[in-house]
Image: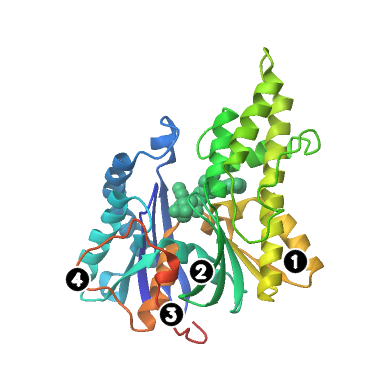
């Protein structure tokens, strides 16, 4: 089965074609980062309008790249939620309309299920069951995964998401948007030993997170360093390093706790923050120590992309599920409401 996947939940227009026999056939991404940069964050109305401009040209591009025509496709998957309502509408309307015009089924995909299944696009995908750490711009969740659509929420952030914390720290350090990669690059040059940031909620039982306190701590540390003068490059690098260390440490502690609780040894990390090198290295070391293994998507599929939507949609279409003709989006949509899917062997 060949499925066209459309991702338009936020500020990336992602389009891809996934073939259940041959894997990913084509993949294209347009990021609106430059459009939103001057506002320091995503402006919803601008995002929707830009998806309208970019979506169909990208569809044409992936079809050309894959050497396919509309008649070669067996289904269309689009991100139905969660995300920005207007942005989701663009992908949902276009996806639903194309599927109708081509006479193939359409399927609305949960954006976080897309992230969660992105490691399945790799050559050596994890087997079920596993624990997944979803760390993105809007979510920080620990999930037990017993199969596609079989999710048990183990813990989540009570306030800011990990990616959001990175973005806010970047803003305070006067770095650009999105901040994660820039904080990470600066942290490489810094000393993790100069400042000790708190590890929120690690001394309490449970698997929830809280990252909003790190904002205040970052701000206070910046103020203390300034004390009348300018923040030096060294100060900024040391703050970035201590901040990243605190986030990574907290995530590693909670992942280890979740694996122990669920008596599992496979960990999947996905979502934008799973691109973070320090996080990957620390988790790999930890999992090696406990005889487990960590799986993650390749860098291109950590942040938003069409490939993960095409893949997730394909699995659901293969199992016989599809959306009806009504165009609906779900800006808020708990992942635990998804229906289970029986996975086909050999994908
Ligand atoms: P959600 O998936 O929750 O709806 P989103 O789609 O905006 O949110 P993603 O595209 O998955 O989020 O990820 C973007 C986030 O990942 C941003 O907050 C960004 O700062 C962060 N990020 C990207 N690369 C890195 C990195 N190397 N280190 C830390 N954070 C990173
Ligand atoms: Mg984005
Ligand atoms: Fe995302």
The reply to whether discs 4 and 1 touch (Cβ–Cβ < 8 Å) is no
- Above or below: residue 334 compared with residue 163: below
**Disc 3 residue crowd, few under 14, some 14–19, many 20+, Cα 10 Å:** some
Q: Residue 232 at x, y = what percent? A: 70, 21
Q: Provide the residue designation for mark 2.
A: 117
Q: CA distance from mark 1 to mark 3?
A: 28 Å
Residue reaching furthest to the front: 204
Q: Provide the residue designation for mark 4.
A: 325
Residue reaching furthest to the bottom: 345
Q: CA distance from mark 3 to mark 2?
A: 14 Å
Residue 149: quadrant of the picture: bottom left
Q: Provide the residue designation for mark 1.
A: 287
Q: Residue 36 at x, y = what percent? A: 40, 36
* Residue 117 falls left or right of residue 230: left
Q: Which mark is residue 340?
A: 3
Say which element carries label 4. Answer: loop
Q: CA distance from mark 4 to mark 2?
A: 26 Å
| Residue in the image at 18% along x and 69% along y | 101
């Amino acid at each position: 089965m060949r499925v066209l996947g459309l991702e338009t939940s936020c500020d990336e227009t992602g389009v891809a074609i996934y073939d259940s026999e041959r894997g990913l056939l084509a993949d294209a991404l347009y990021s609106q980062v430059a459009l939103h940069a001057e506002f320091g964050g995503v402006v919803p109305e601008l995002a929707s309008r830009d998806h309208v401009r970019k979506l169909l040209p990208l569809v044409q591009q992936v079809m050309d790249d894959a050497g396919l025509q509309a008649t070669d496709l067996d289904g269309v998957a689009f991100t139905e939620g969660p995300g920005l309502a207007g942005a989701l509408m663009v992908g949902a309307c276009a996806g639903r309309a194309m599927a109708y015009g081509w006479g193939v089924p359409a399927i609305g995909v949960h954006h976080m299920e897309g992230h969660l299944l992105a490691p399945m696009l790799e050559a050596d995908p994890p087997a079920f069951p596993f624990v997944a750490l979803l760390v993105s711009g809007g979510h920080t969740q620990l999930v037990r995964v017993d199969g596609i659509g079989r999710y048990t929420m183990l813990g989540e952030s009570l306030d800011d998401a990990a990616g959001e914390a990175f973005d806010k720290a970047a803003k305070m350090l006067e770095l650009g948007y999105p901040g994660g990669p820039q904080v990470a690059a600066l942290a490489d040059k810094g000393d993790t030993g100069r400042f000790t940031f708190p590890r929120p909620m690690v001394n309490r039982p449970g698997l929830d997170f809280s990252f909003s306190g790190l904002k205040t701590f970052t701000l206070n540390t910046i103020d203390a360093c300034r004390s009348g003068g300018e923040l030096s490059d060294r100060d900024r690098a040391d703050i970035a390093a201590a901040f990243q260390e605190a986030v990574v440490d907290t995530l590693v502690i909670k992942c280890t706790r979740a694996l122990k609780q669920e008596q599992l040894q496979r960990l999947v990390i996905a979502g934008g923050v799973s691109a973070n090198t320090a996080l990957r290295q620390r988790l790999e070391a930890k999992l090696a120590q406990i005889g487990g293994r960590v799986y993650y998507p390749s860098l291109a599929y950590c942040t938003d992309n069409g490939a993960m939507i095409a893949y997730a949609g394909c699995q659901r279409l293969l199992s016989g599920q599809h959306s009806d003709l009504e165009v609906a989006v779900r800006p808020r949509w708990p992942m635990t409401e998804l229906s289970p899917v029986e996975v086909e062997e050999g994908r």
